[in-house]
């Protein structure tokens, strides 16, 4: 079992819809959780981070964390074609010297 | 804020030569920098973790004598690919962190290395 698992996709949604990206992790000691977006041929960029159970909203993006179930999700409302990218989930734990463990990413395509 | 630069963005070199890639945090002091490699359509692979003033910690399977990392200051880390071979051709990405468990990573734009 991978430490951080994501559906590879591709996930395809129509423009204006809600895209839901999910991530599960195996280390119960995980403390901080990140979502990065990576366009093809580019490096990742940070979208959101979340530390506490519940929801965290930033514009069209909402991160949801459930530590008991060991999952974190990212919702993208009013999806736009420019949101088409690979989304990487990353997890930090206090046993990992500050390193992030990345999932393999979910490829999202938003169709006009 | 939290801008990380990498230089060069693209490099082509001949087999057997060495290539140095620089990673700089422009507006913050990065206690920790990470070096990743990514092959086309594959996930990020962490190569090493670099802390200022100390030796880098390499991930299993990464040859430390081939991939030399120097983190001389809080704003600069370098990766030198020694005696490069075509199989080293890849997208090399650095990231910088304020350190600590909770801190996110800020990625540089990456360096595309092609070894001919």
Image (cartoon, coloured by chain):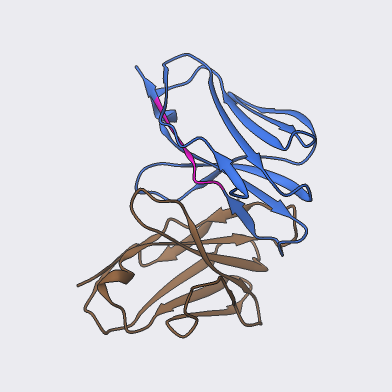
Query: Is residue A97 placed above or below A20 in the rendered structure?
Result: below
Q: Which chain is blue?
A: A
Q: Is residue A107 magenta?
A: yes
Magenta run includes residue B58: no
Q: Nearer the viewer, residue A96 or B25?
A: A96
**Could you tell me residue A6's position as x and y percent?**
54, 38
Of B58 and B28, the residue lying toward us: B58
- Magenta residue span: A103-109
Chain B: its colour in the image is brown
Residue B2 seen: no
Q: Residue at x 69, y 46 (%)?
A: A26
Left or right position of A12 against B17: right
In the rendered image of this protein, does residue B87 appear above or below residue A94? below
Picture quadrant of residue A40:
top left
Q: Where is residue A110 in the image (x, y as percent from the top left)?
A: 40, 23
Residue A67 coordinates in the image, percent (x, y): 78, 37
Name the image quarter holding the C terminus of chain B.
bottom left
Taking depth in this image into account, of A91 and B20 the one nearest to the observer is A91
Q: Which residue is drawn at 66% across and 82% down?
A: B54
């Amino acid at each position: 079992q991978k430490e951080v698992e994501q559906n590879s996709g591709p996930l395809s949604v129509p423009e204006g819809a809600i895209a839901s990206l999910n991530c599960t992790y195996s280390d119960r000691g995980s403390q901080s959780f990140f979502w990065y977006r990576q366009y093809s041929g580019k490096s990742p960029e940070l979208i959101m981070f979340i530390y506490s159970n519940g929801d965290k909203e930033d514009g069209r993006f909402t991160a949801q964390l459930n530590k008991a179930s060991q999952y974190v999700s990212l919702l993208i409302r009013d999806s736009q074609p420019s949101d088409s990218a690979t989304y990487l989930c990353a997890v930090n734990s206090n046993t990992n010297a500050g390193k992030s463990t990345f999932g393999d990413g979910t490829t999202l395509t938003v169709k006009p | 804020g939290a801008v990380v630069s990498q230089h060069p963005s693209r490099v082509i070199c001949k087999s057997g030569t060495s290539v140095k890639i620089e990673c700089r945090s422009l507006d913050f002091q990065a206690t920790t920098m990470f070096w990743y490699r990514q092959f086309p359509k594959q996930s990020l692979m962490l190569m090493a973790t670099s802390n200022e003033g100390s030796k880098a910690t390499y991930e299993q399977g990464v040859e430390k004598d081939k991939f030399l990392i120097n983190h001389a200051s809080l704003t600069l880390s370098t990766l030198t690919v020694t005696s490069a071979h075509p199989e080293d051709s890849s997208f090399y990405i650095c990231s910088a962190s304020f350190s600590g468990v909770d801190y996110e990573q800020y990625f540089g734009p990456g360096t595309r290395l092609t070894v001919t």
